[in-house]
Image (cartoon, rainbow, N blue to C red):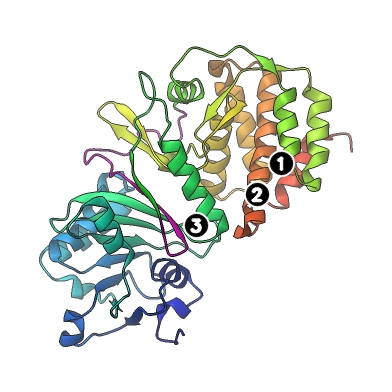
Amino acid sequence: MLVAADPRARSDGLGWVTRAVFDDPRLHLTIGATAPAAARHAAARYAVVPSLERARFLLPLGSRRVTAASVLAYNALRPPKVRASRAAIGLLARVGALGLTRAPVLSVHAPDGAELLWDHLAGLLGEPRLHAAIGIRPPDPHHKPTLQLFDDAGRPRGYAKIGWNDGTRAMVRAEAAALTCLATGAGLPETPRLLLHTRWHDREVAVVEPMPGDVRRLRDPDLPRLAAMLAVARRGGPPAPARPVGAFLAGWRRRAATAIEPAIDALEARDGGLLLEFGDWHGDWVPWNMARHRGGLIVWDWENSGTGVPVGFDLAHQAFQTALSGHGWPAAECAAAVDAALTEHGPALGLVPAAQRFVADAYLIELWLRTYELSADGAGWNPKLHPALLHVLDARLNPAR
């Protein structure tokens, strides 16, 4: 049973992350000053950074080297202000002065028979021991805890993603499946390999290899990487012959809920005779899921990838999600950003104006269906997308009303 002092009883980001990661009720979690003797017997200790009320990160305190690595690894991917803050914390960790930050300490005690996830993963991966740095995000049924795993020397050994409810378990399984069959070759982006896919308690866990240490932030992150998008869509091969959109619409109808059927009907009535090229898509093609590496592109987070979608879906997704998550725009303005991106860049993907219009509206329907399916899996509705997308689609597909 959880008590008030146990962070798993909290309703904030720290609460849901600790519930997802430390799910065994036998584990004893406390926050605050820890007596030296108790600290020596803790299975794990973490600095809660920057504070209990604004927790964003759990830094492992197993050793100075590991603590420093957990904030300095891949720091070149961070925005300048974040990079500077992490560099300062990393320096304090290296010299053993992290206490100057006054960050609260989370201690985890494991009685006999209780096991921490990364200890279990270490055995499966053939590692003597692993330490986990844990990011904290606001509570959301769609979010998955991600653990950055380090060895005793502070070297990154992988990223572990944890599916903790029906929706996120399905996402972890999907990424594991995608990473086992991704095409490779000229023009295709580099992708971290899958190291392990397993279950632990009722969690679905995928461990992906660490990124190369010399990855760097994208220059002009909002600029679409069209050649890489096309390579993914075509699996590194030649263009596919255009085919009618009817089969794609029929696939939607097998997935659809009553609420979206009017939009599908209107799209079919307007564009049912179009011929389009179909292919693969990453499914979450956004600047924060990619980086530069030795003159090329490295792309991660393939949990939403799929096949048989109109070429241009990744372009539409980047425009919509950059507007939504990057700028906080409402759904209607995000949809307008999709239109603008397809008008500007669609021709480079082989999309004529009628195809650009179809791809934009089809993407919005696909996005709503994804939201619906996550909700049906128990992840809850995304309030930014439902019911707003239904209103946007009605206005776009039935302008005379």
Nearest to N terminus: mark 2 or mark 3:
3
Of all residues, the one furthest to the front in this rendering is: 113
* Separation of residues labelled 1 and 2 (CA atoms): 9 Å
Three-letter code, disc 2: Glu
Q: Which residue is mark 2?
A: 373
Residue drawn at x 41%, y 43% as measured from the top left? 288
Q: Position of residue 158 (x, y in %)?
A: 28, 49
Q: Is residue 82 above or below residue 273?
A: below
Upstream in the sequence, badge 3 or badge 1? 3
Magenta residues, as a range?
199-224
Q: Residue at x 12, y 56 (%)?
A: 153
Q: Is residue 103 above or below residue 352?
A: below
| Mark number displayed over residue 255 | 1
Q: Which residue is mark 3?
A: 143
| 138, 211: nearer the viewer | 211
Q: Are marks 1 and 2 in contact (CB under 8 Å)?
A: yes
In-image side of 354 versus 232 (left or right):
right
Amino acid type, mark 1 = Arg
Q: Report whether 395 appears left or right of 300.
A: right
- Report whether 241 appears left or right of 127: right
Residue 272 lies in what quarter of the image?
A: top right
Q: Earlier in the sequence, mark 1 or mark 2?
A: 1
